[in-house]
Amino acid sequence: MAPYAFLRKLELAGPLTDEERSELQNLTLDPRPVPARQDITSGDAADRVCLVLSGFACRYKVLQAGNRRIVSFVLPGDLCYMHDTGAFGRDLRVGALTACSVVDIPRSKLMDLIGASPGISRALWWATLRELSRAREWIVNDTRPAEQRLAHLLCELLTCLQLIDLASETGFKFPVSQSDVADALGISPVHVNRVLRALRTSELATWSNQRITIPDVQALKTFGEFDPGYLCFEGCGPDMSMPSRQPLLACAS
Amino acid sequence: MAPYAFLRKLELAGPLTDEERSELQNLTLDPRPVPARQDITSGDAADRVCLVLSGFACRYKVLQAGNRRIVSFVLPGDLCYMHDTGAFGRDLRVGALTACSVVDIPRSKLMDLIGASPGISRALWWATLRELSRAREWIVNDTRPAEQRLAHLLCELLTCLQLIDLASETGFKFPVSQSDVADALGISPVHVNRVLRALRTSELATWSNQRITIPDVQALKTFGEFDPGYLCFEGCGPDMSMPSRQPLLACAS
DNA sequence: CGCAAATTTGAGGATCGTCAAAAGGCGTGG
DNA sequence: CCACGCCTTTTGACGATCCTCAAATTTGCG
């Protein structure tokens, strides 16, 4: 059950064979806990990748003033330090927002799989492209007023959590603080609170008991200008006329 | 001379062989002009990649209100529609800010090169990771006040243009409008103007005659909290202990 | 030279941040 | 079980940043 989310997301790029699935499942043994509000480091050795099995985490940078800006959420089934380490992630950090369960995967082991399996290669490649697409959407979202910005974020979380069965049709458990959301939206915590009240008053969304409830999902999506296309959950099958239909990640050089 | 910027950026991932360089140069024949303020489409056929040889372009989305948000600049030597087409770029568009010269490259041709050459494969893979890193930095930049935000943007442009010999030590030609910069920063055009005046008064940067002049580069970088690490221009050599040292883009499946 | 677009500046208002304090929730220890 | 302390949430007041509208000025271009 643990690696379900991991496989679910990888298979967005197309179905995997039974061998590929079992190879990937073998990576998820021996998880370790990470307490809330603590960084998820890549483990003792620097050459490890981290797979989050449960909990909410985030990628973030800290500004000179000391405040934190979250640039993306890390949900169960997401890999960390795959690309954002070394020169590509010098000041980027990964932190647990809630208690998390993570697995350290030796990079070499993952690379062996990539080299041996075209399906896994493609899956990881597409995961990277989804990250890029999502980052750009976040930039766009930063131009909207706070109310729509929060609405958009809630829609994204709802959609992403539904994919891995962590959200119902109309809500999801969200055990993070309003300050965390503030850092993800780039606004102040008090303003998050005000905006939440506004959304509650408009009957667009409610946040209580660590749970987001969205009475009218379509209304919230419309208000937040949320179009799930950028998440690349659909239309990405292997039989698509896609740019990266065939050419993908693999062990070269 | 035309493909200089293209090769320069690709070789950030490590030197290319003479064959690889000449294969890439062969792609840059027969450029076509794109007028300012016009979208750079992928040509007649959808399965083409666009290489910008000269001019300033941008990737952008349009919000519901009709305003545009630029999510990244496209400079000479940058590829468009490599990954941001099909499902991965449904609402993302590429527009020319100034008159541009672009080359259409059949995707299949590029894929053949990727499959045949590990160096090219790695180079294009790293270009994608740089895009991701840059997008995340833009998210972070959106949390800064407008003055620092503009300073940061100018520093990024200076650094990126210096790489391809389009900037001197202290300035560069920048023939775009203040509205374009406003869309890139997510603020209003009039506020761009005010912020420019502030930077001019502080003697941090001047913009006149379509040229940015930065009297004290270090001062502007400090003010804008600009750390070039996220651009991944350095420390990315093939001899680095990098995550993607070997495993890269290639023709799989 | 004259038109169109871009830049510049002003005034007023909306959004959002900061500071401060009150209220609520949750775990620990008595 | 209650009391206490800490953290989070909530609300208010005030100020800073930024937007919108509008007009004046400059620049670019035919």
Image (cartoon, coloured by chain):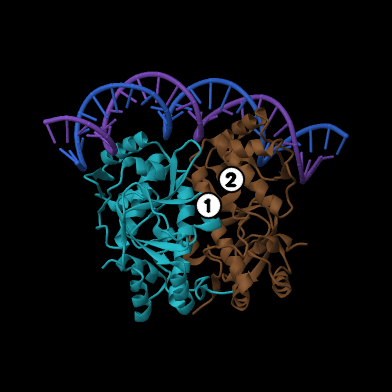
Chain colours: A brown, B cyan, C purple, D blue
Q: Is residue A168 left or right of residue B252?
A: right
Question: Pointer 1 and pointer 2: residues touching (CB < 8 Å)?
Answer: yes
Q: Chain of mark 1?
A: B
B136 or A216, nearer to the observer: A216
Q: Is residue B186 left or right of residue B88?
A: left
Q: Chain of mark 2?
A: A
Q: Which quadrant holds the N terminus of chain B?
A: bottom left
Relative vertical location of residue A70 with respect to residue A79 in this rendering, above or below = above
Q: Which quadrant holds the C terminus of chain B?
A: bottom right
- SS category of the residue bearing label 2: loop
Q: Whole-Å distance between the Cαs marked 1 and 2? A: 10 Å
Q: In the image, which disc is placed on residue B90?
A: 1
Instruction: Kindly identify which residue carries mark 2.
Output: A227
Question: Can see residue B130?
Answer: yes
- SS category of the residue bearing label 1: loop
Relative vertical location of residue A226 with respect to residue B133 in this rendering, above or below = above
Q: 10 Å neighbourhood of mark 1: few (<14), some, or many (≥20)?
A: some
